[in-house]
Image (tube, coloured by chain):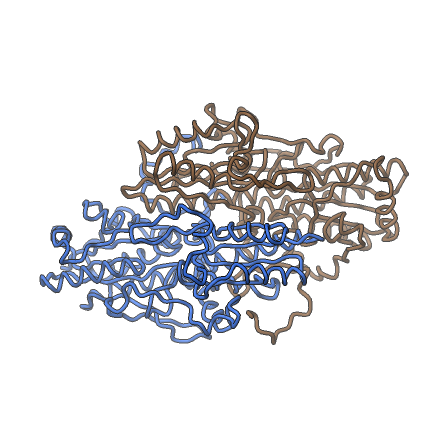
Chain colours: A brown, B blue
Amino acid sequence: MKGNVLVGQSGGPTAVINSSLAGVFKTAMERGFNKVYGMRYGIQGFMDEQYIDMSDFIRNELDLELLKRTPSAFLGTCRYKLPEIHEDRAVYERIFELLDKLNIEVFIYIGGNDSMDTIRKLYDYSLLTGARQKFVGCPKTIDNDLAITDHTPGFGSAAKYIATSIKEIICDAMGFSYKKKNVTIVEIMGRNAGWLTGAAGLSACEDCAGPDLIYLPEMPFSTENFVAKVKQLLEEKDVVVAVVSEGIKTEDGKYVCELATSNASKDAFGHIQMTGTASYLAHVINGELGCKTRAIELSTLQRAAAHMASRVDVDEAFNVGGATVKAADEGASGVMVVIERVSDDPYQSTTGVYDVHRIANDEKVVPREWISEDGTYVTEAFLDYVRPLIQGHYNPMMVAGLPRHLSINQHGYDWSAPKGR
Amino acid sequence: MKGNVLVGQSGGPTAVINSSLAGVFKTAMERGFNKVYGMRYGIQGFMDEQYIDMSDFIRNELDLELLKRTPSAFLGTCRYKLPEIHEDRAVYERIFELLDKLNIEVFIYIGGNDSMDTIRKLYDYSLLTGARQKFVGCPKTIDNDLAITDHTPGFGSAAKYIATSIKEIICDAMGFSYKKKNVTIVEIMGRNAGWLTGAAGLSACEDCAGPDLIYLPEMPFSTENFVAKVKQLLEEKDVVVAVVSEGIKTEDGKYVCELATSNASKDAFGHIQMTGTASYLAHVINGELGCKTRAIELSTLQRAAAHMASRVDVDEAFNVGGATVKAADEGASGVMVVIERVSDDPYQSTTGVYDVHRIANDEKVVPREWISEDGTYVTEAFLDYVRPLIQGHYNPMMVAGLPRHLSINQHGYDWSAPKGR
């Protein structure tokens, strides 16, 4: 009889990270594993013996389907960096002791760059000690900045939410334009990769002109050129919509959001907490050109808006989750499952596996040839790459007018208690 | 043979303001009016003879259905305050001259408080001069601050979008909580009325605990008490989510957003442009309690997110639009159509008409008894009032993965042109 599977979620969540979790659970059950344990808050919670038996929460197919449509990390995530093995062996001894205690055969970690670093280290330690567990990474990030894989689960849904919201924001801005100039600046997530920001360009279609300007972090940003560009556009039209990445940097490598605020804080991996780029630029435009401006940050909804998830993305996330268990069950370890694009039209993809050593901490950015020559838009080739990934829709399961989610905290619901306070 | 109908949109748009426009068009056609003209950018554009023939854009039932699902003001809106009649009679002479030139019999204005002021003045002028036109107001505002009507079209969809987004934001925040305190503060529109902010409470249901704190602008806000309350909550739990209205004011009547920024600007009606309340409070919490904070402004998407519109709201907006034409056709003038709630469960509503003199510029706020005693939440009675208005869903018409809208600018689409740039 097979042993157990342990699965965890790490880093920033996505709208479909739970669809991968559902895929892991379903495939593990189908392949005859005994139990699937879920780490609470990733490897960090697991080291404190925080875990659940997934079958306590997924009792039937409806629960599984609900999990696929639940945003954020069902299990909770962490941003915890394992030490190098030579720095602190005790951490590894502790983890492997717990793995043996729970009879874990397969360890799946759903995450981005930093999480693949965790898979790499655990795998390396297993080689050193001859531990029997298999370690497989499941890619996940809205930022789409993971190398090797054609794209990452989570990206398509965030791109769909962004393109939809930008369409609605442009609709809104156009309705106010009579004899008044107005400039809207929308700030998009993605850190040093412009994939999500570029996806705003998908909003350009029959019924919408799309944004006027798109600034990716791959190109140095000049506030001066930006003001000049907006000024020039305002001579031709009343409404200007610019989309900027939170990660745009000036020529000398300073984040524009740092120009805005002196108290930029950092997370456990030393990443700067980015926010305020749009409002800084709106302030500059208002000061220099005197017109009405509006700054919009799409904020956490970019990674949480399951109600606008892409069906392609939800399904791929599910399949990739299943593929991790299959790979481990067939003997692979120290690998990440990747998505391979088979064809564009009709869009088809399949999965493969790739050595995690060649992936970890390598940031995939938008290639120069997919950015327009003057650096203020993306090319048609870029949009052709993204477009298949936002197709199709999962209707949320609506209860009392709102999307229903599967919640780990949902125990012993009291029907008689008042629902507000 | 009947003459023509003139319809305009004014003030901030909503997700369903175009559904009212669709209702005006359909009822006018069915009742045998000759043409429906649409003012571009409300009365302001109309005075410059900016108008369209609606039948150039609504050529069939699919167009009409698309218009119902298109956010923002299809015709464009304005924030233009008519002078008092005794101040500038020439303005009125100009408007009525244009009405006669276009053979207008019915003048419909879709808008909020300020727009009903326009209907009142035009009606009063028609009484002075014996002009034949009928003037009827169609209520619209996400803020739900119009008197007399049970609620306003636009409110239900904004409430649904807010409750959905808050659920997703709470999901996201909960996923990060391991051994780390974090406070999320979400800023909601609504000016001096707390209807939309209170609607965040609808997110509390089986799978979601809802926000911890809800601050309406109807109650004086104390930053000190807020910090104390958050501090107390953080002793019991790791994740705190507070929802605040953009319009909360301190005891001495100062907007909290004014504490945050020195450059608060005003619009044509002297209203302060509100923004920055959440980020100010997040800054304070971070400074006082040292924990991780996140400020989220739901921003213009609250009034533009047609993809999350409530079916009840879309249908009521359509019916109310139709009812304006019916009222005028039956001889009413100087009135606004109102929604009357017939029953809560099952929810049923009907329309009536009300003297616009008794409505204009009167702000309806949340009654004290619908706010919890300590002023940090809404009551179950409040939620019972809102809940029926967010029910049901219109699936957006999806084309290439994105919701399709009807656009006034969509002329001579070139299939061969590249869709990006």
Q: Position of residue B52 (x, y in %)?
A: 23, 47
**Residue A146, located in which quarter of the rendered image?**
top right
Specify the farthest residue to the left: B129
Q: Quadrant of the C terminus of chain B?
A: top left
| A129 relative to B58, above or below | above
- Please indicate, yes or no, whether residue A16 appears anywhere in the rendered image: yes
Residue nearest the observer in this picture, B163 or A386? B163
Regarding residue A69, the answer to whether it shows in the image is: no
Q: Identify the residue at the far front of this view.
A: B252
Percent x, y of residue A188:
52, 40
Residue closer to the observer: A237 or A203: A237
Estimate the x, y position of residue B1 in percent, counting from the top left: 13, 59
Furthest residue toward right: A129
Residue B390: where, in percent of width, then height? 46, 63
A92 or A382: nearer the eye? A92
Q: Residue at x 78, y 51 (%)?
A: A46
The residue drawn where x is 45% and y is 71% is: B385
Q: Quadrant of residue A49?
A: bottom right
